[in-house]
Image (cartoon, rainbow, N blue to C red):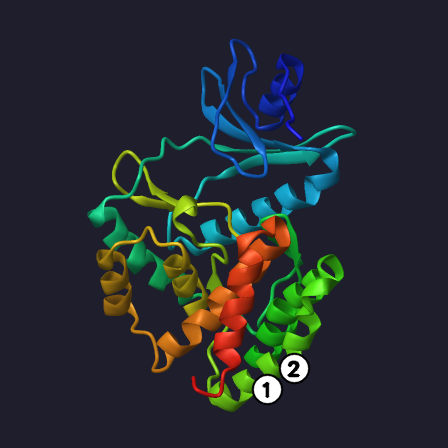
Amino acid sequence: MSVQLDPEKAGQIVRRAGLDEHGLRCRPIAGGDIASACVVETPEQTLFVKLMPARDGGVLSAEADGLAALKRTGAIRVPRVMGRDTDSDMAWLALTYLPLHRRNVEADARLGTALARLHRNTGEHFGWSRDNFIGLTPQPNPAEDDWAAFFLWHRLGHQLDRLEKKASDGGWGRYQRPLFETWQARFHRHRPAPSLIHGDLWSGNAAMDDEGEPVIYDPAVHYADRECDLAMTRLFGGFSDAFYQAYEAAWPLPDGHEQRRPWYQLYHLLNHANLFGGPYLNRAAGLIDNLISPNN
């Protein structure tokens, strides 16, 4: 459902951001997968405003929370949250407008270094202070001391449970036990620190600004194994060798990360299967069969 921003509502948003509404101009902008968006120009500042139906206000609330958390680290540039609200018919999130461009090799190298710096921010537990979303899928974030318990139950198990309810003919519930047992058998010694991660770091959520500095956005933040962010960057491509080389130079990944990578990618494939169905169902099932195979 597309949500449009009329001049009166645009004026309200600008006032909430502490800006002068006189002379504002508003134009729709393409590119969002789950929200409508527009650029609101004022004499003082330009805003990027995301719009969703009121029922989805929690998605934008979680995004604002995640962006604020990333910004507090000072590790990497993110859009600043200027305001958000949900009323009877619309939810909105206003951010500073940043002209963004496709990353070049130099920006990728800076991004790799900055991501390692972000991951140095650690928490006491895995999870987050609130539940949030991965796309439009709810993402539970209860506090867990054990990484395996958090990842298996609240990431893979959660997605499998949703698929079982949505597509029970696929028998998704049968995968849970063998996946859990296989992980424990192969990676029971893997005990990462709870690093702050972006959570949904595909190439569409990372760009560079006019000065060539990397910018990330649309997060699904939580404390997790830092390898999760790196695994996601490799799932759909779009990151250069310079990115990975810079990350490794700043903070090398531990032994076994290549074997764990497809497990962390499975979470996102399961989410795509939940959101979009189609070929993602077969792709996720094929990856599961490969992961639990005794030959691997």
Q: Residue at x 65, y 21 (%)?
A: 12
Q: Looking at the image, can residue 146 be seen? A: no
Q: Is residue 181 above or below residue 165?
A: below
In the rendering, at what x and y percent does residue 54 appear?
73, 35
Q: Is residue 204 above or below residue 170?
A: above
Q: Which residue is mark 1?
A: 181
Q: Residue at x 63, y 55 (%)?
A: 274
Q: Which residue is mark 2?
A: 177
Residue 265 shown left or right of residue 75 in the figure: right
Report the amino acid beneath label 2. Arg
In the rendering, at what x and y percent does residue 178 appear?
61, 83
Q: Secondary structure at mark 2?
A: helix
The answer to whether marks 2 and 1 mark residues whose Cβ atoms lie closer than 8 Å is yes
Seen from the viewer's position, the closer of residues 170 and 2 is: 170
> Image quadrant for the C terminus?
bottom left
Q: Is residue 61 above or below residue 227?
A: above
Query: Which residue is farthest top?
Result: 23
Query: Which residue is farthest right?
Result: 88
Marks 2/1: CA–CA distance: 6 Å
For disc 1, the neighbor class at 10 Å (few under 14, some 14 to 19, many from 20) is few
In the rendering, at what x and y percent does residue 241 appear?
23, 59
* Quadrant position of residue 145: bottom right
Seen from the viewer's position, the closer of residues 293 and 67 is: 293
Seen from the viewer's position, the closer of residues 53 and 67 is: 53
How many discs mark residues in the rendered view?
2
* Quadrant position of residue 267: bottom right
Q: Residue at x 46, y 84 (%)?
A: 190
* Quadrant position of residue 55: top right
For disc 2, the neighbor class at 10 Å (few under 14, some 14 to 19, many from 20) is few
In the rendering, at what x and y percent does residue 204 appear?
42, 44
